[in-house]
């Protein structure tokens, strides 16, 4: 009896199919819905077939893993997947100024051409002097998110706004070799004048800027110098009391180094006494002006300036001797501390530039302090003693001296290191400037140009362990130098200079 209900149900179903309104077949849509199956990417059949982009991702909705199987490369997969997932973000070409676009998921990234930056490369690149000097050949300053290049005297800025082109046959700061030109000479120093104040206004070149005559019988520093007085007392320093030998050797000085090659130190000048003996150095600034140390003016009553010399015992035709027309010494020079140890000499006749004779460049202050004086080292040169107790050199020597950290410099000495000084040299290496080099050049190379950065001033002995050379910081006096080279003074008579125990040489 239990099978009776089942038989009745089957009979009813067959009757409905055989009824006049029924049909044996169903429509195609229904049939496809019944017969269609969900394809599985990880089925055995799928895994056995090589990936196909059309089958995997266009006929079906694919996963990142399936796309990766097709491309077999992560970068190509990512490039496809970003577009496949949310469209091509680069289709509208959002990157400007020929920048290239890379699509991402919901974003894009522009790679900009040189000179542009910003999300869409819409902004000119901000340039900074701290990065490769702003691509400038020489001076660099920042203005309105960009850099402005400029050049030293004797150069003009190229059309590219970066390069400096010489306008003179012997431009400043270049190691120029050229055929000799006509030799010039002169006789002896004559007139002098005190300097304009460091912070004063512009000078009137038609008037005497120095305010009165100098008394040739007095010490131009202010107050008479007593040659019998102990040099320690003259120093007047309380940090420690060095003995007289230390003080006598404190005052500067090229130990070590090497001879200047032909045309290698063309800005070197030599101050010579009436007997042609050199006693101090100098730096040629232009055809009429030479930079030196103020303390050198106390070493000889009469002196001249010789340029083009590489060997004091042999003449090669490039040497020239010039009379000094005017001496401009900084009026704040302190004989006790050697603060403001700087002077400018105006020559009676112009220097004829030639082989071994050319000026060094004067830099711009901010650029020099941020770029030049952050270089590893500078170059000093001179005819000074070849060791502390030795004789002076007959050949012009040069030496590379590293810049020394200011705190290290101060800790190395009991003497005062003012803001107008800096240290350079070696802690233990036996190389230094020495007596006879005073007033000479400290220059720093940038690219292929040399700029004046210091004046050899003083030091404790020569090449002593733990001691450094001390130099006048020229960047503090650039305006003073500029004003001094514009100054004109009435003849004041001969400047009285007295040799004293404080002499550096």
Image: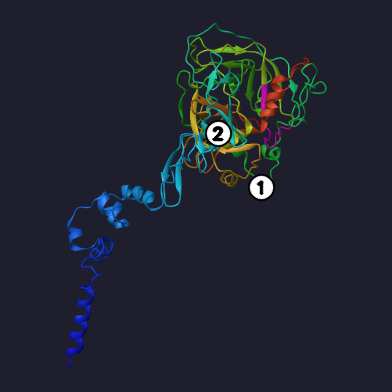
Q: Quadrant of the N terminus?
A: bottom left
Viewer-nearest residue: 486 or 224? 486
The total of numbered circles placed on residues is 2
Outermost residue to the top = 182
Question: In the picture, residue 247 is in which quadrant?
Answer: top right
Inspect this view and state whether residue 72 appears: no
Q: Residue at x 81, y 20 (%)?
A: 213
Query: Relative to 208, does residue 501 appear above or below in the rendering?
Result: below
Q: Residue at x 24, y 51 (%)?
A: 52
Residue 82, image x, y percentages: 38, 50
Outermost residue to the right = 212
- Element type where label 1 sits in the image: loop
Query: Relative to 58, does residue 98 appear above or below in the rendering?
Result: above
- Which label number is shown at residue 372? 2
Left or right position of 368 against 204 = left
Question: In the picture, residue 228 is in which quadrant?
Answer: top right
What span is in magenta?
A: 332-344
Outermost residue to the bottom = 1
Label 1 belongs to which residue? 239
Badge 2 or badge 1: first in the primary sequence: 1
Viewer-nearest residue: 341 or 47? 47
């Amino acid at each position: 009896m239990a099978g009776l209900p089942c038989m009745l149900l089957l009979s009813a179903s067959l009757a409905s199919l055989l009824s006049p309104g029924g049909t044996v077949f169903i429509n195609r849509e229904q049939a496809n819905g019944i017969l269609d199956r969900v394809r599985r990417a990880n089925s055995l059949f799928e895994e056995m077939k090589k990936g196909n982009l059309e089958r995997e991702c266009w006929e079906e909705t694919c996963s990142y893993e399936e796309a990766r199987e097709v491309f077999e490369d992560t970068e190509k997969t990512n490039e496809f997947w970003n577009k496949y997932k949310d469209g091509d973000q680069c289709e509208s070409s959002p990157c400007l100024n020929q920048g290239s676009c890379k699509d991402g998921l919901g974003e894009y990234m522009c790679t900009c051409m040189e000179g542009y930056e910003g999300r869409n490369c819409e902004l000119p690149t901000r340039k900074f002097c701290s990065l490769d000097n702003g691509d400038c050949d020489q001076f660099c300053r920042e203005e309105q998110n960009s850099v402005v290049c400029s050049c030293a005297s004797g150069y003009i800025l190229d059309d590219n706004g970066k390069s400096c082109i010489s306008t003179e046959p012997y431009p400043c700061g270049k190691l120029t070799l050229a055929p000799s030109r006509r030799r010039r000479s002169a006789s002896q120093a004559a007139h002098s004048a005190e300097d304009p104040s460091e912070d004063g206004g512009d000078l009137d070149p038609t008037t005497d800027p120095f305010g009165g005559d100098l008394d040739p019988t007095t010490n131009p520093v202010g107050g008479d110098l007593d040659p019998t007085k102990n040099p320690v007392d003259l120093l007047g320093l309380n940090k420690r009391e060095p003995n007289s030998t230390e003080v006598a050797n404190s005052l500067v000085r090229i130990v070590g180094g090497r001879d200047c090659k032909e045309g290698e130190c063309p800005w070197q000048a030599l101050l010579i006494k009436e007997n042609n003996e050199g006693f101090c150095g100098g730096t040629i600034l232009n055809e009429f002006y030479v930079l030196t140390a103020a303390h050198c003016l106390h070493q000889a009553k009469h002196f001249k300036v010789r340029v083009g010399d590489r060997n004091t015992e042999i003449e090669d035709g490039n040497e020239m001797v010039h009379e000094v027309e005017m001496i401009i010494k900084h009026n704040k020079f302190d004989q006790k501390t050697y603060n403001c140890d700087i002077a400018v000499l105006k020559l009676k006749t112009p220097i004829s530039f030639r082989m071994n004779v050319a000026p060094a460049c004067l830099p711009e202050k901010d650029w020099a302090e941020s770029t030049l004086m952050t270089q590893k080292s500078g170059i000093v040169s001179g005819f000074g003693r070849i060791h502390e107790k030795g004789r002076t050199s007959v050949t012009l020597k040069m030496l590379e001296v590293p810049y020394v950290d200011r705190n290290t410099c101060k800790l190395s000495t009991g003497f005062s290191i003012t803001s107008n000084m800096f240290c350079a040299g070696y802690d233990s290496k036996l190389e230094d400037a020495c007596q006879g080099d005073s007033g000479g050049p400290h220059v720093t190379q940038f690219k292929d140009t040399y700029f004046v950065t210091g004046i050899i001033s003083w030091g404790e002995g020569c090449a002593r362990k733990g001691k450094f050379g001390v130099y006048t910081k020229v960047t503090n006096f650039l305006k003073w130098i500029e004003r001094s080279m514009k100054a004109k003074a009435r003849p004041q008579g001969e400047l009285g200079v007295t040799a004293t125990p404080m002499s550096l040489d």
